[in-house]
Amino acid sequence: MRVTIKDVSREAGVSIKTVSRVLNNERYVGAATRERVQAAVALLNFRPSVAARALAGKRSFQIALICDNPSPYFVYEMQSGIRDRCAKEGVRMIAQPYDRDSATLIEDIENLVDATSVDGLILTPPVTDYDAVLDLLARRGVRFVRVSPGGDVALSASTFIDNEAAARLMTEHLLALGHRRIALVRGHPDYVTSAQRFDGYAAALAAAGIALDDDLVREGRYDFASGSAAADALLDLPIPPSAIFASSDDMAAGVLATAHRRGIKVPEQLSVAGFDDSALASVVWPPLTTIRQPTRAMGYAAADLLLAAADMPPERRELPYELVVRGSTGLISPR
Amino acid sequence: MRVTIKDVSREAGVSIKTVSRVLNNERYVGAATRERVQAAVALLNFRPSVAARALAGKRSFQIALICDNPSPYFVYEMQSGIRDRCAKEGVRMIAQPYDRDSATLIEDIENLVDATSVDGLILTPPVTDYDAVLDLLARRGVRFVRVSPGGDVALSASTFIDNEAAARLMTEHLLALGHRRIALVRGHPDYVTSAQRFDGYAAALAAAGIALDDDLVREGRYDFASGSAAADALLDLPIPPSAIFASSDDMAAGVLATAHRRGIKVPEQLSVAGFDDSALASVVWPPLTTIRQPTRAMGYAAADLLLAAADMPPERRELPYELVVRGSTGLISPR
DNA sequence: TTGTAAGCGTTATCAC
DNA sequence: GTGATAACGCTTACAA
């Protein structure tokens, strides 16, 4: 029924072990032998059983993505990037989307690690900074890579963009347009990126000699609804902002929707800017100025780090971001 | 190191086989024995190895989702629904996002089936109707469930909404608002749903005694860009439509963006409607009237069918849809 | 450079 | 009801 190593070894006229050697790219296989085996593999259409490999060896050729993110676009891009990289190595990606508020997250991850014997994990915020998870993985000796981690950066290899610098750049851009009352909708409090982005915003204002106005800084949760609600609060202020900088694109979309509902013209009466975490910007009305970050590339890089040789030191790989001005951001008559 | 069945059996004072029986809910286990085993499992925190189970038995407790869909929201909702259902059964979902135009799709699926020995597959359009894939699965005797399949419906269990009826309902709604020139942006030609939705649109027009106008029917590809382009073409017509019905929400968003760019007021000057395949509507400007379908629930149902007893006949499970009028769709002064 | 034998952790088979 | 024992398909020692 199933084609096994045994069939291949018989076809190639070598031992099972030799086939295994070829499969795993081990040294000490004669060139001619190797070719003969490869021919047999191709002929019989042999595909090694993940289960058997995982059971017998140290590798399962599977990694898992632990993704608990409010943005479907982000998740999708991330998965695609990781999958692309893994495909080159013959490694499978198991996607494990988790509910935002799952009470069983730790247990689920423990379960995953124990049951599937994955070769490694990729974590995205906010799980990147859950001590319980990090402890668990360390205890189990499971290799993992984190995307945009906060806190202890030496704990694992990781990929990131400089969120603070990016937020500073965007804020400077808005300042250059003449804005003085620039509001910020913060990200989800659990995410370290939220604080980093706030810091960049605050730094730019400080450098411009503008005092931080607490009224102009609102909590968000990285999703549409919270962006929409924050915009309502901001536009209800006695002196509303002339620009709103949302810490994610879902929230920026929420801000835009609110402005639209209230009959406020963007960008004539209000500039809207945001982090484009998830490539959602293309599905949202222009004009929207965004910090574009390569989510898919970030996933690719994360997988690359995970698949790297085990003896490499934990590497931190930074990815570039861009300020993308869509349409006109408008020049404001400061109120 | 690892906790195995052996450890559990020792702890419970029974044989390995008995532990296995409890694990698999087999009959012929004494109540007392069962409890003792369960206690030992909990105490030792035992989690059976997927690899060993897959290798030794007929089940791997893993299923895979084959998803090649242009909408990240759809993918995300689908994954979540399936995962929720599987969690109840202790089954793991392997997500396999594929690139739209992957030339290696068939091979990849074959690889997946052979390598991971999954218990079953869930297919989403358009893979649901790829003969090569269906043949492959039949040949391998792999169980699968299809979401919104076209063609031969008896081939497998499936979930669906009545796309034709839904499109008819939406078109009737637009007609009732006074529209006479209603344009349709079709879905991707590879998707059977595209044709079903067109049929509903055509049926409603016919019932209203309105001739089908080829100029008002445009090809789309279920994504933002094609919706945007189709809207441009439609609005360039000598007599443009007063309403545009997009076959997906991504395309509806594209239509809205184009209208916005051209300074056309929605809904005062143009009504926009769409299928809300992916819950994206909440991220898009109102006013947008949509056919909402429960993507997550569809995933849940698909998993349910896949995990059902093997001897059940292929079941077709229909899910309800809703016409959601967001804000006012406006009454049109027919042009 | 190649082959042999002993597992890996579970389920299936068949006894008891 | 319960328990030995042989698979399952591969990798890891260790020999040759």
Image (cartoon, coloured by chain):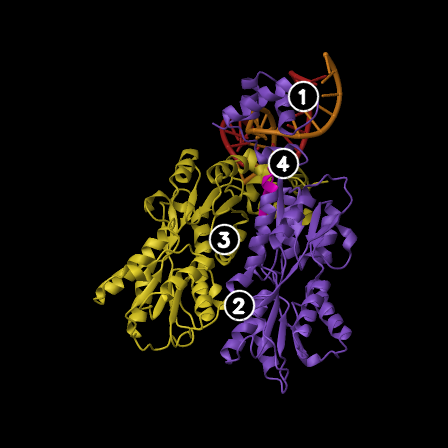
Chain colours: A yellow, B purple, C orange, D red
Chain letter for the residue marked with disc 1 in the picture: B
Q: Secondary structure at mark 1?
A: loop
Name the residue type under label 3: Ile
Q: Residues within 10 Å of mark 2 (few under 14, many from 20)?
A: many
Residue B175 in the image, given as x and y percentages of width and height: 68, 74
What is the CA distance from the residue labelled 4 to the residue labelled 2?
A: 49 Å
State which chain disc 4 sits on.
B
Chain to which the residue tagged by mark 3 belongs: A
Q: Residue at x 49, y 38 (%)?
A: A104
Secondary structure, mark 4, is helix
Of labels 4 and 2, the one closer to you: 2
Residues shaded magenta: B86-95
**Eyeballing the image, is A38 above or below B15?**
below
Q: Amino acid at mark 4?
A: Ala
- Left or right: where does residue B127 sit relative to residue B39? right
Query: Is residue A249 found inside the magenta-colored segment of the image?
Result: no
Mark 3 neighbour density, 10 Å: few (under 14) some (14–19) many (20 or more): many
Q: Residue furthest bottom?
A: B238
Q: Which residue is mark 2?
A: B286
Quarter of the image where the C terminus of chain A is located: bottom left
Residue B269 visible (yes or no): yes
Q: Earlier in the sequence, mark 4 or mark 1?
A: 1
The reply to whether residue A39 is visible in this rendering is: no
Q: Disc number at residue B29?
A: 1
Asked if both marks, 4 and 1, belong to the same chain, the answer given is yes
Q: Are marks 3 and 4 in contact (CB under 8 Å)?
A: no
Q: Which residue is mark 4?
A: B54
Whichever of labels 4 and 2 marks the residue nearer the N terminus, that label is 4
Q: CA distance from mark 1 to mark 2?
A: 59 Å
For discs 1 and 3, the disc positioned in front in the rendered view: 1
